Amino acid sequence: MKLQVLFLAVCAGFLMNGCNKKPKGTRGENEIWLEYKLFVPQQLVVKAGTTVTFTNKDNANHTATNINGLFDSGKITSENSWSYTFDKPGTYSFYCNYHSSNTSEQGYIVVQ
């Protein structure tokens, strides 16, 4: 019985630690992190010609998909990145195909 309780306590510790996982590293100036159903930052302002990198800092798959179909990263797996160069001024909204019903996993880039 004591072994079962110890096993459950260890499993609960691993589970809680995984749920509270914070991304490691420092986000780049023109980088957007895809975290647990969230883009960080949700808003980014850049100059025309800037390449923005979307990096998955989560264990789940994510996408960076433009609402008007201009760009779609496809599946970005954990710890992988995808980049897009914004050549023309405007406001570009994006979302995650896997979690689009979650309003926190939406964002936009303003290109000046």
Image: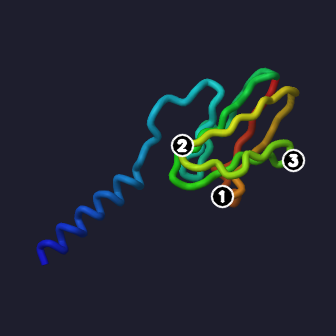
Instruction: Please give the label number shown on residue 68.
Output: 3
- Towards the viewer: 112 or 51: 51
Picture coordinates of residue 79, whole percent (x, y): 54, 43
Number of other residues with Cα within 10 Å of mark 2, as a class: few under 14, some 14 to 19, many 20 or more? some
106 left or right of 86 in image: left
* Disc 3 secondary structure class: loop
Query: Of callouts 2 and 3, which one flags the residue occurring earlier in the amino acid sequence?
Result: 3
Q: Which residue is mark 1?
A: 99
Query: Residue 44: which quarter of the image?
Result: top right
* Disc 1 secondary structure class: loop
Above or below for 51 versus 57 = above
Q: Residue at x 71, y 46 (%)?
A: 64
- Towards the viewer: 75 or 21: 75
Specify the amino acid type for callout 3: Asn
Q: Residue at x 60, y 39 (%)?
A: 55
Q: Residue at x 81, y 43 (%)?
A: 71
Query: Of callouts 2 and 1, which one flags the residue occurring earlier in the amino acid sequence?
Result: 2
- Towards the viewer: 107 or 65: 65
Instruction: Please give the label number shown on residue 79.
Output: 2
Q: How many marks?
A: 3
CA gap between label 2 and label 1 equals 18 Å
